[in-house]
Image (cartoon, helix red, strand yellow):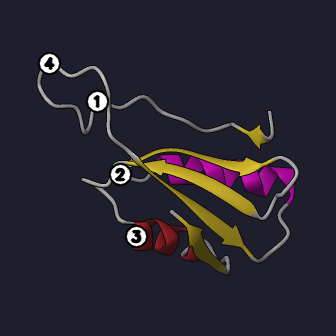
Amino acid sequence: MDYIFSAAKPTARGLSEGADTMYTGDIVIHIDESLGDDRICNLERDLCGEEGVVSACVHDKRRHLMLVDYDPADRSPSEILGAVRRRGLHAEVIGF
């Protein structure tokens, strides 16, 4: 597996009555800084604490790329990017 996956949380958001699947969106965020393991783990954990973020993981071999799975009913890509930037990082959304 190519992703460090240290942060994920189960959620019932986005489920319609009687449904057993959740509809989510994915974005890829490019982080300009080189981050150590501790800072990556903290960022992944912190983002998962944000409302509407289901999971966040950094690519093992491309440590400047983060895949974020989110509930579009609760959070927009620009809000997630803002959460990354509020942590003092320079970043941009490069795919969704």
Mark in front: 2 vs 3: 3
Residue assigned mark 3 = 79
Mark in front: 4 vs 1: 4
Q: Position of residue 78 (x, y in %)?
A: 42, 74
Q: Secondary structure at mark 1?
A: loop
Query: How far is the residue under mark 2 from the one under mark 3?
Result: 10 Å
Q: Residue furthest left?
A: 17
Residue assigned mark 2 = 51
Q: Amino acid at mark 2?
A: Glu
Q: Amino acid at mark 3?
A: Glu
The magenta stretch is 36-49
Query: How far is the residue under mark 4 from the one under mark 1?
Result: 12 Å
Q: Which comes sooner in the sequence, label 4 or label 3?
A: 4
Name the foreground residue: 29 vs 33. Answer: 29
Q: Position of residue 7 (x, y in %)?
A: 61, 38
Residue assigned mark 1 = 12
Query: How far is the residue under mark 1 from the one under mark 3?
Result: 20 Å
Does the magenta stretch mainly form a helix, a strand or a loop? Answer: helix
Q: Position of residue 55 (x, y in %)?
A: 53, 42
Task: Identify the residue at horizontal 50%, vertical 46% (top origin).
Answer: 48
Mark 1 nearby-residue class (10 Å; few <14, some 14–19, many ≥20) = few
Left or right relative to 74: residue 55: right
Q: Are marks 4 and 3 in contact (CB under 8 Å)?
A: no
Q: Amino acid at mark 4?
A: Gly
Residue assigned mark 4 = 18
Q: Are marks 4 and 1 in contact (CB under 8 Å)?
A: no
Q: Residue furthest front?
A: 95
Query: How far is the residue under mark 2 from the one under mark 1?
Result: 12 Å
Task: Identify the residue at horizontal 60%, vertical 61% (top origin).
Answer: 28
